[in-house]
Image (cartoon, rainbow, N blue to C red):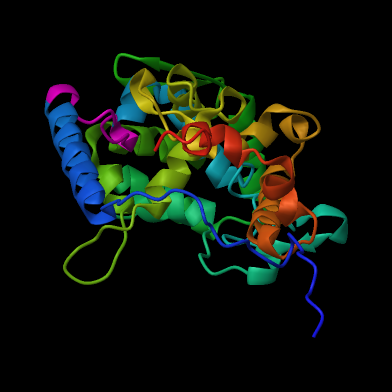
Amino acid sequence: MSRRNFNPDRDVREWTGAQRPYDILKEGAIALLVVALLTAGLALVFGSPDEKQVTIQQWSSADPVDFATTAYSELAGTSGLAGYGAPYNNASDGQFLGVTHLYLAKMVGVHIPIDPAQTFVLRPLATLPDAATVRFALATWKNASDTERQNWLNEYGKATLSFTHGQLVATPLSLSNPVDVLIASETAMARSGALDSAMVTGGGLYTTDYTNVLLFIADGGWFATLADHQHLLGDQWGMMNETGSYPGQAWLWLYTFWYQIHPFSTSGNADVDAWGIMMLLTAGLILVPYIPGLRSIPRRTKLYRVIWRDHYAGRV
């Protein structure tokens, strides 16, 4: 019977060199204890690097004009969310995968339906108690035609917003424009903290769904300014950074790397493109043991002899 030739892609030579005892359980237990002590100690010394949660009240107090401008864009249907598409609405096809033009979010469909005008402006204002002026403005808006609403929105969009003596002022503006009352009232509601609780949703005893709050804040410019100061924007390697200049998730460097180079850094399709590339790279990594030639590189280059040079030198 003929002996088969050795194939590095298929066969493994039996080790006949020196050996030494090794207690992996002991080493693992020591490593676990050391890491646990370091984690607890560093946590006590430095605390959590995370910032406190951002609220609508903070936003409207820090920059009431930006808040009012964002609320107006939600009412007018011109905000980022209003034109986002799935899973919130059907306003856009969303991003597509490579040259296939597979619109992934559109394929999933709208499963978190949000009407920005109702969700962020009209419905919260309807919860205000004893607000006759607001109720009148809401009724005027509800009973108006689409043309009338658009005329009011156009007029308000041309006005100059300012915040003086604790009040939002839009000039010039006609007294009959209900948008002025709606946006000014919501700004006051936000500054009081009532809007935060009015927009939190959830069933049962606990109401912990902050989706609407987060989406509303994200549509404004103030939140992006905070992210910029913390170096958390996409063009600042933000995905792998941590707040307060703490070391972040270094293992995400490869993912966030794609956002820093062209054409991804200027593409409106960057999220899906980066995701697709990472899926391909991940598949390639998983399939390394099954790819002839590629899986034999370590054996053929004998790089392991450099890594374990003491062992191969006979010093065990």
Residue farthest to the front?
1
Q: Which residue is located at x 77 percent, y 56 percent?
A: 97
Q: State whether residue 163 is above or below residue 218.
A: above
Question: Residue 55 lies in magenta, yes or no?
Answer: yes
Question: Residue 99 lies in magenta, yes or no?
Answer: no
Q: Which residue is located at x 16 percent, y 68 percent?
A: 205
In the picture, measured across the screen, residue 228 lies left or right of residue 95, that is left
* Secondary structure predominantly adopted by residues drawn in magenta: loop
Residue farthest to the right?
99
Closer-to-camera residue (233/256): 256
Horizontal and vertical percent position of residue 136 = 39, 50
Horizontal and vertical percent position of residue 21 = 30, 52
Quadrant the N terminus occupies: bottom right
Q: Quadrant of residue 119?
A: bottom left
Closer-to-camera residue (240/231): 240
Identify the magenta region. Answer: 45-57
Q: Which residue is located at x 76 percent, y 61 percent?
A: 291
Q: State whether residue 134 is above or below residue 8.
A: above
Quadrant the C terminus occupies: top left
